Each structure stands twice: as C-alpha cells, then as structure tokens.
Image (cartoon, rainbow, N blue to C red):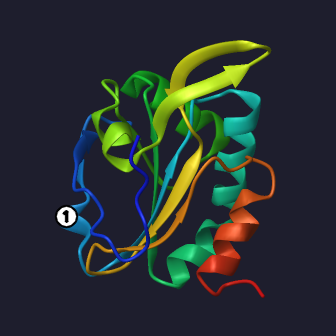
Amino acid sequence: MTRLEPGTPAPDFTLPDQDGNAVSLSALRGTRVVLYFYPAAMTPGCTTEACDFRDSWTRLQAAGFTVIGVSPDPIGKLATFRDRDALPFTLVSDADHAVMDAYGVWGEKKNYGKTYEGVIRSTFVIDADGVIEDAMYNVRATGHVGRVLKAVGLEG
C-alpha cells in the first residue's frame, strides 16, 4: 500500500454519487476539496464523522471547500445515509475500491483480534490545482473534523 504525500497530484477519479450522478475530481479544479474515506455508512463511527463534517460544512463551504465522502457502500445506502442524517455534501461509492487503492486507504485492518481488508479511515485536503495539501491516514472518527479545520486554517 502506497501512501500519498503532500505535494503530490491527487489521483483523479469518477465515481457515482448518492443519486447515481458521476462525480469527477478533475471537474472540481479551481476548488479546494476535503476528500474523506470511511468504512461504512450508518455505522456509529462513520455517522459521528459525517455529522461532524455536516456541522462544519457551512464554514468549509464559506472558505471555498467542497466536501466529498467516499465509501464502498452502494449508492442506495449512501442516499439513505444522506437523508437520515441531513448530510449536505456529496457521498460517492467506490464499490470496487479502486480509488481507495489509489489513495492508499484500502488495506489490512485488525478488529477484535481478526485481520481483514477494508477502508482505513483517512482524509485528504486537495488544493485548487489538484495537489494534495494534507494527507491524514488512519484517523479516529471522533474529533477528526476539528483536526481538518485546524489543518485548513479554520480553527486555531
């Protein structure tokens, strides 16, 4: 698994969003992007993280950021997650985890003594030119959005 570093181009992608529309990173050039990867919609940790992004969304949007959440969930589950928790940002489905592989966030995990392959919760801040400003791997759901806000200069 290769980890991406600040200063490297963010791998481009086109994935379906919660409504089945294609979302491409390259189409967002000129906008800074917070791209976060999470294991599964509607699980406790992922709900905490998504709701924290929701609660900070106005500040991020006012500062010119687009927020995109990526998981391997099917688009129907993403739509339910968005509606259930009033998430104002885009959720995309990476069902075959090709984008997760490109970002180095699909890999070996351990839970209750069992080892398996899955999403390593991670967030990337991407500048308007499509270059990674910050790469945060293996983060905890609780308190993570505060760290993102600090990294982008919205919280001191």
Q: Nearer the viewer, residue 69 or 99?
A: 99
Q: Is residue 83 above or below residue 133?
A: above
The quarter holding residue 104 reads top left
- Residue drawn 70% across and 62% down? 145
Q: Is residue 72 above or below residue 89?
A: above
Count of residue discs: 1
Determine whether, in the image, residue 44 is placed left or right of residue 40.
right
Determine whether, in the image, residue 98 is placed left or right of residue 103.
left
User: Which residue lies under the disc numbered 1?
Assistant: 26
Q: Position of residue 19 (x, y in %)?
A: 33, 36
Q: Inspect this view and state whether residue 136 appears.
A: yes
- Residue drawn 37% across and 78% down? 127
Q: Position of residue 50 (x, y in %)?
A: 64, 47
The residue most toward the top is 114
The quarter holding residue 92 reads top left
- Residue drawn 32% across and 71% down? 8
Q: Nearer the viewer, residue 5 or 50?
A: 5
Give the secondary structure at mark 1.
Answer: helix
